[in-house]
Amino acid sequence: MSDFKMDRRQILAGAAFLGAGVVAAMSAGRLAFAAEGKILKVQNDKDISIIDPANRSGWWEENVMFAIFNSLCQYKAGDTWDWKLDIAEELDASDPTRIRFKLKPGIKWTGGFGEVSAEDVKFSFERIADPEGKSGYKDDWDALDHVEVIDKLNGVIHLKQAFPPLFKSTLPHGSGMIMCKAAVEKAGGAFTTEPPATSGPYKIGTWVPNQKLTLVRNELWTGEQPYFDEIQLTPITDLKTAEIGYQSGDLDVTKVSLSSVPQLKQAAGADTTIEVLPSLHYMWMGLNVENPKFQDVRVRRAIQRAINVDEAIQAAYFGEGTVAHGVVPPPLPGYRAKNLHAFDPAESKKLLAEAGVKDLTFRIDLPGDTDRITMAQVIQAQLKAVGITVELNVMDRGAYEDQFMESKGDAYKKTEAYIVEFSTAPDASWVTMWFTCDQVGTWNWQRLCDPAFDTLSKKATYETDDAVRTKDFEKLQDMLEESASCIFLTHGSNCIMSRSNLKNIHSANGQWLTFKDAIRV
C-alpha cells in the first residue's frame, strides 16, 4: 500500500459528505483492505438509479453498463478517443449512410434469452430513436432511418444522411449499447436497476444501495476474459472523502479534487499514480428563466456581470482551476477562447436599476461537495457587493437532480438558480443538445427555449465541414451567454489516483472506467 498516513479524526471528518452506511463500514473496518489480487475497488461518483441506456442518468451508471452490456464498438482505454470493435466482428462505414455490421457468434444473454442478434441491435437503436418514445437521448440517433436485419448476425444501419457524431458520441457511448429485445419487452419496455438480461463479461453480483455495488464474472461470457474477477464500486460524491477512502486502503482507484493534487503528489509513495487529465466536464450557474425573478434579461445580465468567475474558481481549487468560456470543453473543436460579457459590478448595479429591481433575493441550489460549496460562497459574497442577497441550499444529489425533472413532480416551478456540472462525450453536439427546447423539463434546467438555438444546434450536428461546424458551436455558446441564463464557471480536470500497478483503467479523460480492459501488472 501507499505511504499515506491517516488517523480516525480524518476519517470521521469526511462523514458529512459520504453515505452513512459507507462511513460506518469504513470506521468499523468492514470495508476490506484493497485486495492485491483479482478484486478491483473503485470510487464511483454516485450510486446507480437507472442502468437502462435509453434512460440513464450519467457517467456513474455508464461505468456499470459498459461492463455488463455490449456495443458494436467502444472507446479504447488510454489517452486518445479511438474506438475498437466490441461484439462486432466487422463494422464497415465506407458508405457513411449505410453502416454494415457483423456480430461475433456465441455471445449469450443471461436469463436464458439466447444469443445476441442483429434483431437486438435493431431494437436497441430504434428504441432510443423513436420520436414517440421517452428516451432523453433520442438525439443520439436523430439521423437513424432504420436498422436492416439481414440474418441473425448481420445487419445494416441506415442513416438519413451522414452523421459526424456517430463514431464519436453514439456508437461507442451509452446510446450504442445493445439490449435484449425479448427480455426488455417481457419487462414491460423499460427497467431501472435490475436489467432483465445482460451480455457483457460482468454481471451484477450484489448491490447494497448507497454502499456498494459488486460486479462479478458472467459465466456465459465467451469473449476475451477480463483480468479482474470482481469489481466493487463504492458511491462517494465528495472527492475529499474519496481521497480518504484511498488513503485508508478501501479503494484502488478514485477521482480526487484538483485542489488536492499538489498535496497528494507530495505525500504519495511509489505505488500511487496521480494523473491530471483534460476533462470533458462543463460547470455553470444556471438561472430558471421561467421564475418571475429572472424573466427580465436585464436582471439575469446583472447577476452575470456581478460574478468574478476567476476569483471563485481560484478559491475553490487553490489556484489550480481554469475559467470556462462556454460549455464546450477545450479538448473539443468549438471551444471558445473568451466570453462576451466581462465581470463589471458597476454595470451590474446599473442594470438592476434599469430593471427597477431592489433588494433581489434568490436561492442557489447545489450538491454538497466541498469545492462547489466554496465556489458558491465566493459567488454569494460577490453578489452581496452589488446588493443581491443569495441563500445557498446544499442538497442531497438525488433530490437536487429530481427537482428539475417534470417527471418527478412540480418542484421545478420553485427552482431559482443552481450550480451544476455535466460531462459530455467527445463531440460538441453532445454539449449543445441539452439546451434545446425539447430538453426543457428533463436536462434543460434553465428552461430556456430558443427555436433559433435549436435550428443551429441541429445544423452544427450534421455539418461535415469541420471549420464551419466549429464556428457554429462557438455561435451557439454566444447565444447561451447572450441569454444570460448561464454563467460559465469551469471545465475542471479529472484527477485520477490509483495504484501504480493498475493499467488500462480509464478512458482518455478519466471519466469512464474500462473494466473490460483493466489489468494489474
Image: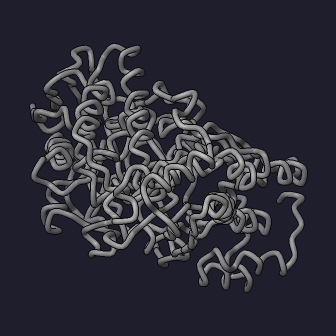
Is residue 269 visible from the viewing direction of this image? Answer: yes
Residue 28 placed where, x, y %?
73, 86
Count of number-bearing discs: 0
The quarter in which the N terminus is drawn is bottom right
Residue drawn at the location 53% of the way across and 40% of the way down: 280
Residue drawn at the location 48% of the way across and 40% of the way down: 327
Q: Is residue 152 left or right of residue 203?
A: left
The quarter in which the C terminus is drawn is top right
Residue toward you, 316 or 41: 316
Residue 314 placed where, x, y %?
74, 49
Residue toward you, 221 or 462: 462
Residue 49, quarter of the rendered image: bottom left
Residue toward you, 475 or 334: 475
Residue 255 placed where, x, y %?
65, 54
Residue 497 placed where, x, y %?
72, 51
Whether 488 is drawn above or below 237: the answer is above
Type of colouring:
one colour
Residue 83, quarter of the rendered image: top left
Residue drawn at the location 74% of the way across and 46% of the way down: 501
Q: Is residue 34 left or right of residue 92?
A: right
Is residue 172 visible from the viewing direction of this image? Answer: no
Q: Is residue 454 left or right of residue 156?
A: right
Whether 321 is drawn above or below 81: the answer is below
Whether 85 is drawn above or below 379: the answer is above
